[in-house]
Amino acid sequence: MAAPSMNFTERPVACVLSDCDGVIVDSEVIADRILIEVLGDAFGRDDLEALSKDLFGLRVIDIIQAMEVKVGQPLRLERRLELQQRIDGFVAERAPAMPETAEVYRALGLPVAVVSNSAFPRLHRCVERAGLLPLVGRHLYSAEDVGRPKPAPDAYAHAARQLGVPPADCLVIEDSVTGVRAACAAGMRVLGFLGGSHIAEGHMQRLSEAGAIALFTDMRELPLLLGH
């Protein structure tokens, strides 16, 4: 774990805004496998894994559209939405909860919101599976419902407004460059989480370069970073 580059006590943290995939559920490896399988069947291709390397952190619907361009096979909107729903359904069903995340978030004693690029049905199911719905309550925000997806700041800014907390008092937990950039653009402090099974060599540096002020690999480290 890298040491924090700033003292959190200089400005108290009033709430935690958490990404879902790769932070609350360890879903990225499973999601990638399901996405390649479903889209491989749809496009009749077996080379999609290599074509998906630069799409981490995007919405499923955006990944499908990017794949359409890469393979030169445009899909009808109805087909695109059908594939998105199939992928999201499989991921929500199979992704395990990230170890310790629910326990740590509950123990912090802070308001928690979940902010994701995932469609709301998948987001809701994943948070429910992780046991966090009682803590989060209505503060589940899918980027597609509140504005532009990450890396735009819309969803994080919306969550802060709903909680009534200034952006500078929010702490964001993210695992992707896309999410870190969104949080920084919203004027929030962001920590990079490296505990997911999808984290590859060099990812730590990319999160730091995107604006993460500290990095950690075990969710049990979070209270120590916050001085709790």
Image: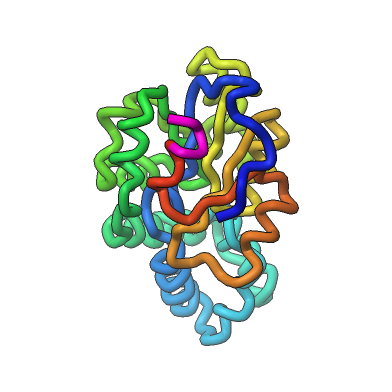
Asked whether, in this view, residue 115 is left or right of residue 74, the answer is left
Give the percent coordinates (x, y) of residue 204.
63, 60
Q: Residue at x 63, y 76 (%)?
A: 51
Q: Is 199 located above or below residue 174 in the figure?
A: below
Report which quarter residue 104 is drawn in. top left
Q: Quadrant of the N terminus?
A: bottom right
Report which quarter residue 124 is drawn in. top left
**Residue 227 covered by magenta stretch:** yes
Q: Is 28 located above or below residue 38 in the figure?
A: above
Q: Quadrant of the C terminus?
A: top left
**Residue 60 covered by magenta stretch:** no
Q: Residue at x 55, y 60 (%)?
A: 76
Q: What span is in magenta? A: 224-228
Give the percent coordinates (x, y) of residue 123.
39, 43
Give the percent coordinates (x, y) of residue 71.
65, 77
Give the percent coordinates (x, y) of residue 140.
41, 32
Asked whether, in this view, residue 88 is left or right of residue 172, the answer is left
- Asked whether residue 70 appears in the rendered view, the answer is yes
Report which quarter residue 147 is drawn in. top right
Residue nearest the observer in this picture, 82 or 129? 129
